[in-house]
Image: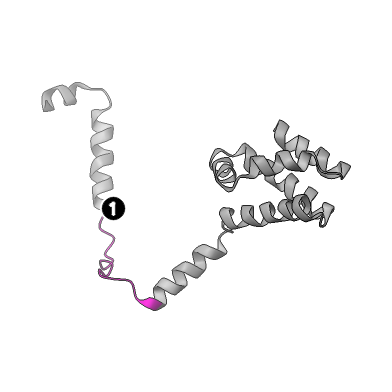
Amino acid sequence: MAANAGAHPDYPMWSALLRWSLRQGDDGTAPSPQGPMSDEKRRFLEAALKSMGEDDADRQRKLFEAVEAHVARGEDPDACVDALEQLEDDALDLDAARNLLKLGALGLVVRAVASGDGAVSAAACGRVAA
């Protein structure tokens, strides 16, 4: 096999690159400590991960509750329209759309179409069309 590899026109270049890469692998640092993570490091990691973004499921639940508040009790129609508009992006994302289905959002949006408020009905129709 080595005889065949030597016949390839790029073999010397790849061979030199491999030797160089292997030399660069030893950077002289100490190995990372092994073992369970301390409670302090775990809290830091959890806080860092939470600060990177919000939980989509919680955000969707809040949007769902805003729509439900209007559909079931006739509360703030502007909050309902805002929530329906925010749900459009989620409806276009496959994973987020799956979460919406689990929450029962499609049925709620269909009920919002029959809302007495024109803006809510229009926003709900837009989500159904999406």
- Horizontal and vertical percent for residue 100? 59, 45
Local crowd size for mark 1, using a 10 Å CA cut-off: few (<14), some (14–19), many (≥20): few
Residue at point 25%, 39% (across, down): 16
Q: Is residue 54 above or below residue 101?
A: below
Left/right placement of residue 103 relative to residue 46 reads right
The amino acid pointed to by label 1 is Gln
Q: Residue at x 55, y 60 (%)?
A: 52
Inspect the magenta stretch and tell me whether residue 26 lies in it. Answer: yes
The residue at which mark 1 appears reads as: 24
Residue 25 is left or right of residue 51, and the answer is left
Residue extending farthest front: 72
Residue furthest out toward the bottom: 40
Quarter of the figure with residue 17? top left
Viewer-proximal residue among 36 and 21: 36
**93 and 53: which one is in front?**
93
Report the predominant secondary structure element of the magenta stretch: loop
Q: Is residue 21 above or below residue 66?
A: above
Q: Is residue 43 above or below residue 22?
A: below
Tally the marks: 1
Q: In the picture provided, is 93 more to the left or to the right than 31?
A: right
- Report the magenta residues as a range: 24-39
Q: In which quadrant will I find the N terminus? A: top left
40 horizontally vs 108: left or right:
left
Q: Quadrant of the C terminus?
A: top right
Mark 1: secondary structure: helix
Please state the horizontal and vertical placement of residue 107, each as a whole percent of the image: 66, 41
Check residue 38 for magenta coloring.
yes
